Image (tube, rainbow, N blue to C red):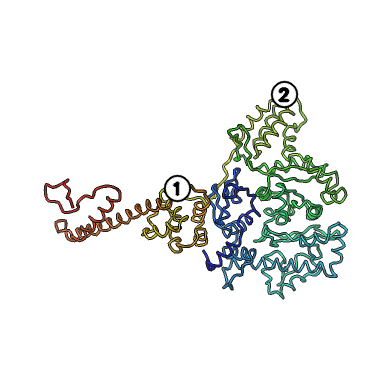
Amino acid sequence: MASYSQTVLDEIRAATDIVDFVSRFVNLRKAGQNWKGLCPFHMEKTPSFMVNPRKGIFHCFGCGVGGDAFGFLMRQDKLSFPEAVRALATQAGVALPEERGGQAGERGREDLLRAMELAWRFYVEQLAKPAGERARQYLAQRGIDSEVARRFGLGLAPEGWDTLSGFMKSEKVTEDVLVAAGLAIPREGRAGVYDRFRGRLLFAIRDLQGRVVAFGGRAFGDEQPKYLNSPETPLYTKGNLLYAADLARPAIQAKNRALLVEGYVDCLMAHQHGFTETVAALGTAFTPAQLGLLNRYCDEAVLFFDADAAGSRAAERAEELLEPTRSSMAWAVNRTGTIEASGALRLRVALLPAGHDPDTFLRESGAAAFEERIGAARSLLAYALDRAIADPDGATGPRARTNAFARAALMLAKVGDAQEAAQLSREAAQKLGVDATQLWIEAQRLQTALRRPVPSAPAATPAATPPPVERDLVALLLHSIEARDALLPLVVEVEDFAYVPFRTIVAALRLRPSDPAESLMTDLAAAEARGVLAALLVEERAELDVRVSIEQFRRRLERSQRLRRAREMSQSIADVQAKTGAAAPLPPEELRVLHQETAVVYEITGGVAQSLEPRTPGSEGAQTDE
């Protein structure tokens, strides 16, 4: 797996604070020697994702995924190993040796990232030039400070069909790369390309690593479309990213909340007024994937709706986000009788005056009024509950109330967060005039019927249960250099380990017995082996007497060696007999060695060795006193 020297990898690993690095993607909390959070690689309600800062590794006890900072970045951003090394080296300020090429797929992705970076810098420069006067006036009219524009990397796509394309040609960027990156469009009926963005204010869309992967272009006048966004590319899937997520992440984690707005300018204005936990959708309604991303960093998100349309829009969004049901996150009650939190993101709706969006409201009323609206925000699901209770035909009476009860129970059954479900059930019961406990029980019954298991990642889960003895031995080898010195020479064949990941780990240890165990991550090609290694390193183990453990395993391994020799000798004797006949005399030297090895085995196990000398007729069952 490693294509860089171990010295370079260790230097990058040592310079990377894995807790700080993973915290950019996962909301971590201290838990003993480790840090714990919700796994970013599978859906879970109870945190089982652990990060160990001392060893620089992570492991999820839910899905089995584990590794070091390189492995985390590879999974998080779908990078190859060399790409992850280069990204972390850049962040850590570690100089890499001259690279000698790379795989075509890796180079292709890097070519796209380079093109996007060059395009972004080009657009930013254009905004500062005389030709950018119109765009700068537009920003001033919208009340956007120049510092905010700089921090968000705003730029200008100048007029002209090939302004960017011509610049890129001078930078040795091919037309194929421009098209693949979404920066240019092939000409119809003839060769060549033309620029996708022309005469627009450009908003740079970054991934969570802060790399530009797409653009949003705003027209200055009545040009259509008003907003033109990059198409989906190998770098960019609009439903999976949020605008300004890389800038907002620290504030989201600090405040344990995110503010979700719909427009780029709404987002900029919120940041300008101090609400730096704000992110925006990318030309779409908010998706479950985007909300799942936020759930790594906070417990609550606030959406903003115009008061005129808030009720219907909130209800529609709530019902969309409840389908397909996430009721596999079943409610639970702990031993104290308190409802356990499920870890689901709680969504609230802040109402703005009719005709206002966050941009206009902040400019007109200021930050204090905006904060008041946030404080008064109501649960998004409450709007859906109101719609569920209301009879669509306006009917009243016992039958209408029975139907409303059923609709409310069904909606509550789909709510992932137990505490929110309990609060909503009390509200619904009061409005329906029924017993809250009765509604709660019915919702639980429906939840059980609706529950669908969340598919797990089978490739990341170990295929078999490892033998406890093997697990203890490998753990001892990983945690003790002294144990490696004493025991690794006794491991004749790694195939003796029944559990395949243990074979891989021990084989790597034998090649580098004096190196820290966590540095072996880059030696293991199989994700399963890296997950098992991480699990063994991240768990908090009870203190053991290492020398006693070494002696116990030494005796066990020595016994295994002797048994192996005895089996080999027995097979050799059987082969001789097969060739010469059963009546032929047995080879005395082989018999002597076989007896010697068997005697030592019995001595190790506290038994008495039996004689293997040829027996004379009538001597069955006799022993010698050799």
Q: Which mark is residue 465?
A: 1
CA gap, disc 2 and disc 1:
56 Å
Q: Position of residue 493 (x, y in %)?
A: 37, 59
The residue labelled by disc 2 is 398
Q: Identify the secondary structure beneath mark 2.
A: helix
* 502 sits left or right of 32 in the view: left
Identified by mark 1, the residue type is Thr
Q: In the rendered image of this protein, does residue 335 appear above or below residue 363?
A: above
Q: Residue at x 23, y 50 (%)?
A: 609
Identified by mark 2, the residue type is Pro
Outermost residue, left direction? 617
Residue 494 in view here: no
Q: In the rendered image of this protein, does residue 395 appear above or below residue 525?
A: above
Q: Position of residue 28 (x, y in %)?
A: 63, 49
Q: Which mark is residue 517?
A: none
Task: Looking at the picture, tell me which residue is in the foreground, 248 or 582.
Answer: 248
Task: Looking at the picture, tell me which residue is in the foreground, 274 or 431.
Answer: 274
Few, some or many C-alpha atoms within 10 Å of disc 1 (few <14, some 14-19, many ≥20)? few
